[in-house]
Image (spheres, helix red, strand yellow):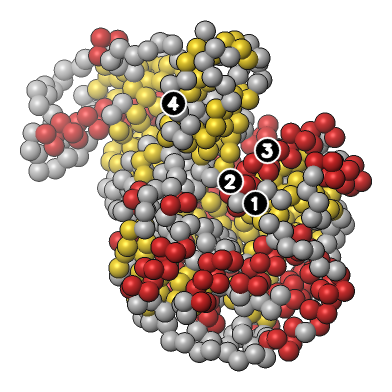
Amino acid sequence: MLHKMQTMASWSRRFATTCSNASQKVVHRQINKLLIANRGEIACRVMRTANRLGIRTVAVFSDADEKSLHVKLANEAYNIGPAASQQSYLRGDKILAVAKKAGCQAIHPGYGFLSENVEFAELCQQEQVTFIGPPASAIRDMGIKSTSKHIMSAAGVPIINGYHGEDQSDEKLMQEAKKIGFPLMIKAVRGGGGKGMRIAETEADFMPMLQSARTESEKAFGDSAMLLERYVRSPRHVEVQVFADHYGNAVYLYERDCSVQRRHQKIIEEAPAPGLSEELRKQLGEAAVRAAKAVNYVGAGTVEFILDKEDLSFHFMEMNTRLQVEHPITEMITGTDLVEWQIKVAAGERLPVTQEDIVKRGHAFEARIYAEDPAGGFLPGAGPLDYLSTPETSNTTRVETGVRQGDEVSIHYDPMIAKLVVWGENRASSLQLLIEQLTNYQIAGLQTNINFLIDLARHEHFQAADVHTGFIEQHTATLFPKKVIPATKVVQMALAHTLNERVQSGASLGAKTCGPFDVEYGFRPNYRVPRSIKIKVGAMEHIVTIETDNDGSYSVRVDDGEWMKVTVRRKPYANRFLLETNIEGHVSCFNAVISGENISLFDENGMIGGEIVQPRFLVTERSMGGVDASSVTAPMPGVLDKLFVKPGDTVKAGTPVAVLIAMKMEHVLKAAKDGVVKAIPNAEGSNVRKGATLISFE
């Protein structure tokens, strides 16, 4: 719980003693074996640097991650428990036991999980295992938002008006909320990653939002304490990368703009922040360094600010006492390896540079690729990566990921698949490269946000750097337009399906080659038989009629439209079924991925999905009930955390009936109409699939 609130004077005295504390004796320790207490892309990221430095790596994994990429990349790996993170990746005692058993001198926590856990940092120190992160005291002070506000104020860092007190009663919080005024932000004192955060637009919203934030915070951080802040409409979220050593040296590596977010979580970041003067950039950097020195910080940290979009005034929001998800864009513009710095500073070395040595160059973007449904409120998803093809990496393109084709995005962890990082000489060239490489990031078998990221990057206001934290909400109409699928795309789907059948036919007959023009079994020249294929794209079904002409071309029409002259050829390229079509003189190239009856086309606009509709007698009989108001179903895979009703209960429309936990977020499910509960097929704590019936009504 909250520490006893110290007075402003005591924090001022503490700030004044920073320099003397920084001169304490530094222990030098050789690190030749490192345990990474994390999973996924950040574990792989740390391993790459460790391997380059000649340091052996040890991975830990849950039952769900036994075949994961980070396990394969490590020199050694140890199982630490069941899939649930509370029983595996959050078990500091298990992880430390593995570190000692494996002979590791240090533990790198990555981000999330134990990276900002005070008790784990202290336990490592007690067991004489180097924790690659800041001192436990810094994690404690900056991890408790109310405490951090007082420290920052004493250090001369601007803070925003709010309530950060110990009295957490409903009455006190409501009283303070009225003083601050609405809208206001409710935030978990130990929060992060958008968890335990709600916006109360009006006084009537306050209590429901407060209770929801408390519940989510308790689950995520084991603490339900809240703070209140004035909510700045249309602010920019700008954060500064800082780094400090054991000798009192601290530098800033410029700032990142992380304004464009959904569910209070970042989705795309860039560095440096656009539109800032060099003077403002310096003010932000120096304020961030003061913040770090105020808590005797050591290692990599990020100081986050709210920047008013209108007058460009800034206020301290929080400090993340760890490596950030978006650290690669800072590395791209400064030519540094922050993980290498982390390891060397933890071993007792001094910072390799002074502030004057750090020069920013060019512009970088990071786009986070998630398994989620943007049009469905960005609800997270899960499932297998049936097909995965990524852009080629280079000095200007990085792909940070922890998955391969065939891996599964698990319901137990964050749904991020990868981070795509690009660099250019300026913002315009970097943004153009981002769009191009997003079109080259191709995933089938699982819904992702890639198409949305392409549309976002092309949006005129984003192109103009007119960004703020409400960007997606403000531009919903233009970011989610109703898209009309051209007839040419339906033609391409039908041709891809037809040519894929020929390839498969050739393979099944033992052919040495499997090109789309291999002669299939039973082929007779000059024998023209029209073929009709029914294709469903979105909610629309189309009939595509194909005739093979004598010259090897095709005559094709969609529904009752005009006949089109089409030629097609395959272009060999890695693992892609790359096709080039000439439709009435328009030549275009696309990749086709076909899995069963599903077809995915990838081109310069992203992915378009379709389905071959088989004749009714070939389709397995399915339930025709669908999803309607007579039941409450799971909108995504997850864990059924709470049930508020039981069979026989009468409920009103809009009544909360259950809570689903998915991707570490809490989702409250409500009844769509008045009714009487008939059955509840799953018990609390059950893992449920997307679409599963959770509650049915009479």
What crowding class fits label 1: few (fewer than 14 Cα within 10 Å), some (14-19), or many (20 or more)? some
Please tell me whether mark 2 sits on a helix, a strand or a loop.
helix
Q: State the residue at coordinates (36%, 65%).
A: 59
Q: State the residue at coordinates (36%, 41%).
A: 384
Disc with the residue nearer the chain's start (3 vs 4): 3
Q: Which residue is mark 1?
A: 223
Disc with the residue nearer the chain's start (1 vs 3): 3
- Choose between 635 and 659: the one closer to the eye: 659
Q: Are marks 1 and 4 in contact (CB under 8 Å)?
A: no
What's the residue type where badge 4 is placed?
Asn
What's the residue type where badge 2 is placed?
Lys
Expressed as whole percent of the image width and height from the top left, the position of residue 498 reads 26, 27
In the rendered view, tell whether residue 18 sits above or below residue 605: below
What crowding class fits label 2: few (fewer than 14 Cα within 10 Å), some (14-19), or many (20 or more)? some
On residue 212, the disc is 3
| Residue farthest toward the top in the current orientation of the protein | 698
On residue 588, the disc is none
Disc with the residue nearer the chain's start (3 vs 2): 3
In the rendered view, tell whether residue 104 sits above or below residue 202: below
Please tell me whether mark 1 sits on a helix, a strand or a loop.
loop
Expressed as whole percent of the image width and height from the top left, the position of residue 375 reads 57, 32
Please tell me whether mark 3 sits on a helix, a strand or a loop.
helix
Give the distance between the C-alpha atoms of the residues marked 1 and 4, in whole angstroms.
28 Å
Report whether 496 appears left or right of 475. left
Give the distance between the C-alpha atoms of the residues marked 3 and 4, in whole angstroms.
23 Å
Q: Which residue is mark 4?
A: 682
Q: Which residue is mark 2?
A: 219
What crowding class fits label 4: few (fewer than 14 Cα within 10 Å), some (14-19), or many (20 or more)? some
Report whether 230 appears left or right of 506. right
